[in-house]
Image (tube, rainbow, N blue to C red):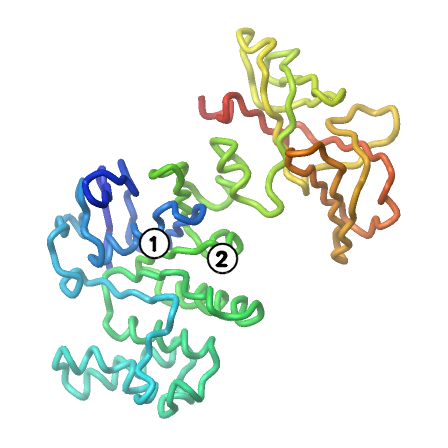
Amino acid sequence: MANLKLTDVAKTYGGTVDVLKDINLDIKQGELIVFVGPSGCGKSTLLRMIAGLEKITGGTLEIDGQVVNNVPPAQRGIAMVFQSYALYPHMTVRDNMSFALKIAKKSPEEIDKAVAKAAKILQLDAYLDRLPKALSGGQRQRVAIGRSIVRDPKVYLFDEPLSNLDAALRVATRIEIAQLKESMPDSTMIYVTHDQVEAMTLATRIVVLANKGIAQVGSPLELYERPNSEFVAQFIGSPSMNLLPGEIVETGKQTRIKMAGGGVAVSDYPTESSDMGAKVNVGVRPEDFLEVETGAEYIYSGTVDITEALGEVTLLYFQKEAGADPIIGKLPGIHADLRGKEVKLGAVPEKVHIFRNGTSLLYR
């Protein structure tokens, strides 16, 4: 298994169109790194550059200390699982999984041992003699993963492997990938997805890509609890973090912000005297809002436009001004009776984020 190091990696098309630039990232053996970001941010392109399917136009990629920019894909010790299963329809599961080993002229004994090991890990033992058409979508994706495992690569690359599955299969297969990683703790894996649940539940670290580069790298909880910018704050988490304008009126270990809507926010983000009067955005995640009683201090007050009862929680969508993002609250229990009523929301200081010029005050 392997360590990877990307240093000032860039991708340019036609010499003029920058897709990625200044990508610096160290990936340690045994990590499961997830690339996320908006459509077109270059996450799949970066994965393909690591695989050798796209040429690196700047910087260096090292695998175990060896620069591999000009090393052919087949010689990088990498296996890739694509969105489409890319299975040979006329071959059995056994033959699909063993095909690369036969091409590499491995002995029948080595091939049988590798296929049996992968089939056991992925619970495919009972399906080895079936054709792909006799398998479910989740089983086909497991075969595609098994085809990678038998090669015993240094690095596994996953390019949105669950996007073609329905919701139930996606959940089941995500759990299987998590179990696969646990069974192969020394394996290095890089995973591209647009699904935040996949990212939050699978990743050792998440790499958020935006504006042709890396916006933030951290563990799922780091990015969720301490985003470094408004972009990351709203990208990680669903529904996204609410941002409300205000002005700092008291600084120190705790900060008080007078809200544009008339409320007051108290945050554990420390500030300095020079921050007094600064215009900021206060960030509160929907699940961190608390309903407060009349007369109590609140951060936001508004009329509930729509409620969505999800059983254990209720989402509250507040009436918004034209062009503004909706303010969303998430309260435990059933609150369908709040529709059309004015509700005041507060939050504990440790859950109140402060952003100035788009950047978190914790990272300035």
Quadrant where the image shows the N terminus: bottom left
Amino acid type at image mark 2: Glu
What residue appears at the point 55 percent right and 11 percent down from the top-left corner?
A: 275
Does 339 sit above or below residue 2? above
Residue 196 on image: x %, y %: 51, 52
Point out which mark residue 136 bears.
Answer: none
What residue appears at the point 19 percent right and 40 percent down from the top-left corner?
A: 15
Local packing at callout 2 (Cα closer than 10 Å; few below 14, some 14-19, many 20+) is many
Does 44 sit above or below residue 140? above
Where residue 260 sits, quadrant-wise, is: top right
Q: Is residue 355 left or right of residue 95?
A: right
Where residue 269 sits, quadrant-wise, is: top right
Contact between marks 1 and 2 (CB within 8 A): the answer is no
Point out which mark residue 44 bears.
Answer: 1
Point out which mark residue 198 bears.
Answer: 2
Residue 134 on image: x %, y %: 44, 89
Local packing at callout 1 (Cα closer than 10 Å; few below 14, some 14-19, many 20+) is some
What residue appears at the point 15 percent right and 80 percent down from the top-left corner?
A: 103
Residue 94 on image: x %, y %: 31, 86
- Element under label 1? helix
